[in-house]
Amino acid sequence: MAARSRRWFLGLASTIGYAIAACRSKTPPPEPSALGAPVGPYGSRSRFERAVRFFSRAAVPEETSSKTPLHETFGMLTPSSLHFERHHSGVPDLDPAAHTLTIHGLVDRPLVFSVDELKRLPSVSRLLFLECSGNGNTEWKGGAEPTVQRTHGLTSCSEWTGVPLSTLLNEARVQPAAKWILAEGGDACRLGRSVPLAKAMDDVLVAYGQNGESIRPEQGYPLRLIVPGWEGNVNVKWLRRIKLLDQPAMTRWETSKYTDLLTDGTARQFTFEMDAKSVITRPSGGDALPAPGPYEVTGLAWSGRGKITRVEISADGGRTWSDAELQLPVLPIAHTRFRWNWTWSGGEATLASRCTDETGYVQPSRQALTAVRGVNSNYHNNAIQNWKVAANGTITNGNA
Amino acid sequence: MAARSRRWFLGLASTIGYAIAACRSKTPPPEPSALGAPVGPYGSRSRFERAVRFFSRAAVPEETSSKTPLHETFGMLTPSSLHFERHHSGVPDLDPAAHTLTIHGLVDRPLVFSVDELKRLPSVSRLLFLECSGNGNTEWKGGAEPTVQRTHGLTSCSEWTGVPLSTLLNEARVQPAAKWILAEGGDACRLGRSVPLAKAMDDVLVAYGQNGESIRPEQGYPLRLIVPGWEGNVNVKWLRRIKLLDQPAMTRWETSKYTDLLTDGTARQFTFEMDAKSVITRPSGGDALPAPGPYEVTGLAWSGRGKITRVEISADGGRTWSDAELQLPVLPIAHTRFRWNWTWSGGEATLASRCTDETGYVQPSRQALTAVRGVNSNYHNNAIQNWKVAANGTITNGNA
C-alpha cells in the first residue's frame, strides 16, 4: 500500500461520498431467518455468478478455442473451470486406470507408466501461466476485438503438480544420439510437438495435478506435459507417449501451424518462449465508468523468461508512464497482478500497460513489434494493448 | 531436487522394475479415433474423479462441518469445490446485487457499501490458509479417526482478494474509544466475532475473490472477513456488518464456543493465532503400501505466525528425524508442501512430521501439548500426527 499516493486516497472521499449518500436510500437486506443449505461433498459457484469462457460458433466446435474472462478474475490464479481451452480434435474422455505413458525411441530401456506409478514418484509443484501463442492474434492490424476476454483471454495461471520429466528420461537411459523429444497427446488428432532434449531435462513436468486436484479434462486429464514459459501448444495434453529422436519430428503443429510468417515470406519456426506481456483487465473494453473520480486500474503481466520486474501504466496513450504496484509474491513464469490508482478527470483518456521482465526485455508497442515482424503473423503478438476511454466513460479497444 | 539422496534414486530402479515388467503385460489403450467434447463455457472435473468432502450424518446438517480430502490434493492450493466447510446455520443464498456491508458503532461517519462499490476500491490478493480451530479435536485422547481427511481436513488454502479493512475504517473515521470490532455474518444465526482494532487495522481483508473468481457460497459469498493466521471462525462469512466497540461483544462463539477448557477448570478465551502445525498426507491412514521400496512421503505444514522454516520427518515414531524438502515459494500463513524420499524396508514403521515456523516455534508432540493443556480442550490441537505402518503395508492412525 506504501506505493499508493496519499492524494488518490483523499480522492476516495468522492467515492465514499456516493456511499454515504446511498446510505440514506440504501436499505440493507432483511435479516436472515431461515436455515441455509447443508454441507455438501463437492461445491459449485453461486447461481448469481455469470462469468463464462467466450467462444464463437464454429463449424467444428471440437477444433476451436475458448477464452478466459480476464476482466472477471481476481488475483493471479485462474479458476480451473474458466481456464482457456484450445482443442484440435475435442476433449477425449480418458479413464486414468487405463491410460499409460510410453517412453521409447532412442532409449536403452523403453518404459510404460500407469498414472498411479507416476503419482508414487518424487513430485514438484509450480505456479505457472500457460498462454496460447495465438493469444492476441486479432490485434496485428488494429483493434479488432471489443473486450480483454477476446483480445487476451488465451492465457491462464494454475498450480501444476507432477513428476520431473528428467526423472523418467534418466530411468529410460537416453542414448547419446537423442537431441529432441516428440510429445504426443491422446486426442483423436494425436497432437504432437517436438521439444529440445535440453529443455526436457531442465524443468519440464509430466503433470497430473492442477490447482490442488486432478487436471481438468479440458486441460489434459489425466496427464499433461508442462513446459514452463513455452507456448501453450507444446504443453501437450492427454499425454500418451514421449519418443526420443535425433531431430524434430516436423509435425503439422510445428510446420503449417505455430510458425510465424515474416515480411520476406519466410516463416520463423520453434518460437518457444513466450515474451513478456501485460494487459489492463479492469477497467477495459466494454466497461463504462459511472462518473469521474478515483478508480483502481488493475491487470496482469507475465513472461516466459522469468519474473516480471516492472509494470508501467499510461493514461494518455503512452506519452507519460507511472509505475504500478506489483502484488507480492512475484513468481517466475506466473501471472503477476498489478494495480495503479487513477483519478479519471472525465475527459478522453487512453489506458495502457507496459511490462519489463528480469532479462531487461520491455514489452513493445504494436508499431515497434510490427516494424520487425510485419502484420502477417498469427502467433506471438505481445504488443502493448490500449483501451480508449470516451468522455462519457465508455471504454473501447484503443489499438487504432 | 538437490536435497534428495542419490541412494534413494538408485532405489527407484526397483519401482521402475515394476514398470518394465508391467510394460510387457501392460497394453497402452487403443489409439483414439473419434472427436472428443467441444469447448464449453464453465468446466467441471472428470467423471472418473471421486474426491469429496467428508461429513457425518447430522441431526441438523446445516450446523456441522465437512472436511477436505487432504490425501487426494496436490501442491499448496485447495480446490474451492473441496474447501472445508463449517456452518452454524447453513449456507445462505445471497444476491450480491442486494447485499450490503454496514460499518457503524463508534465511528463518526457510518457507511453502507454495496458489493460493486467495494470492488472499485484498491484491492490486495494473498495466498492464505484457513483452519478451523476445531481441526484435530478428535485426537486429544489418542488416535480416534482413521484418515488424514478426518483428523486434519479442516484446513484449506486459497488465494483471497479484497479490500483492506483499514481503508474502510479510515473512511468511516473510527472514534478514539473504539478498541474492538464486531464482525457479523448474514447467515440465520448471524454468527459474530470480536477482533481487536489493532488487528483489524493491520492486515484484515473484506474479501470478494477466492482462487480467481468470486468467493464460493460455502465460503461466504459475496463477502468474507479474512483475518490472516487467525482461527477460521473469526473469518466471518456472508459479512453484513462491522460495528466498532469499546470492548469485545462476548458473542456465543467467543464464550460458550471457541474457548479452550484447561485442566484447572478455567477456559482460555481469544486464542486467535493458529500455531504451527503439519501432517503427512500421503501415505497416510487408510493407504496400503503395495510392496517394500521407495516412496515419496508428502504433506502440508502451516503457521498463523508467518513462514514455515523447517519440516522434519521421522519413520521410527520420533526417535530420529530428517529434514524434508520444502516446495518453493514458501509463503507466510500459507500451506507449505513438503516432500521426503523414503525407502520402506517392509517392517513396521511410524511416520510423523514436525514443523518449525519463523518465530522459532516447534510443533509439539501430543504428550508435550497435553501436559500444558490437558485433554479437555476441543480447539487448537496442533500436535504431531503419527501414522502407523504395519508389516503388511496397511496404515492406521498412530496416535496411541
Image (cartoon, coloured by chain):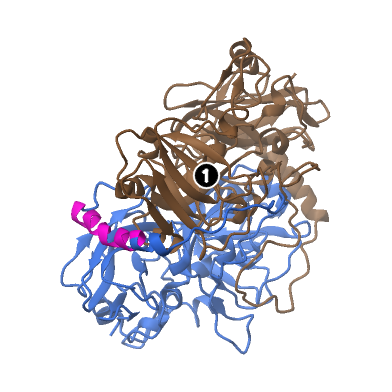
Chain colours: A blue, B brown
Apparent side of residue B49 relative to residue A69 in the rendered image (left or right): right
**Is residue A41 depicted above or below B354 in this figure?**
below
Percent across and percent down for residue B225 are: 48, 46
Residue at 61% in and 53% down? A32
Residue A190 in sight in this render: yes
Circle 1 sits on which residue?
Answer: B184
- Amino acid type for the residue under numbered disc 1: Glu
Q: Residue furthest front?
A: A24
Callout 1 environment at 10 Å: few (<14), some (14 to 19), or many (20+)? many
For the C terminus of chain B, the image quarter is top right
Residue A360 in sight in this render: no
In magenta, the rendered stretch is A6-20
Q: Tell which subunit mark 1 falls on.
A: B
Percent across and percent down for residue A95 are: 76, 61
Residue at 48% in and 35% down? B194
Report the front residue among B182 and B231.
B182
Give the dominant element type of the magenta stretch: helix, strand or loop. Answer: helix
- Local SS, label 1: strand
**Is residue A281 depicted above or below A57 in this figure?**
above
**Is residue A160 depicted above or below B253 in this figure?**
below
Percent across and percent down for residue A89 are: 65, 78
Report the front residue among A39 and A64.
A39
Q: Is residue A187 in the magenta section?
A: no
Dividing the picture into quarters, in which one does residue A42 lie? bottom right
Residue at 36% in and 50% down? B110
Percent across and percent down for residue B42 are: 61, 69
Report the front residue among A240 and A217.
A217
Q: Is residue A18 in the magenta section?
A: yes
Dividing the picture into quarters, in which one does residue B344 lie? top right
Number of numbered discs present?
Answer: 1
Apparent side of residue A377 relative to residue B390 in the rendered image (left or right): left
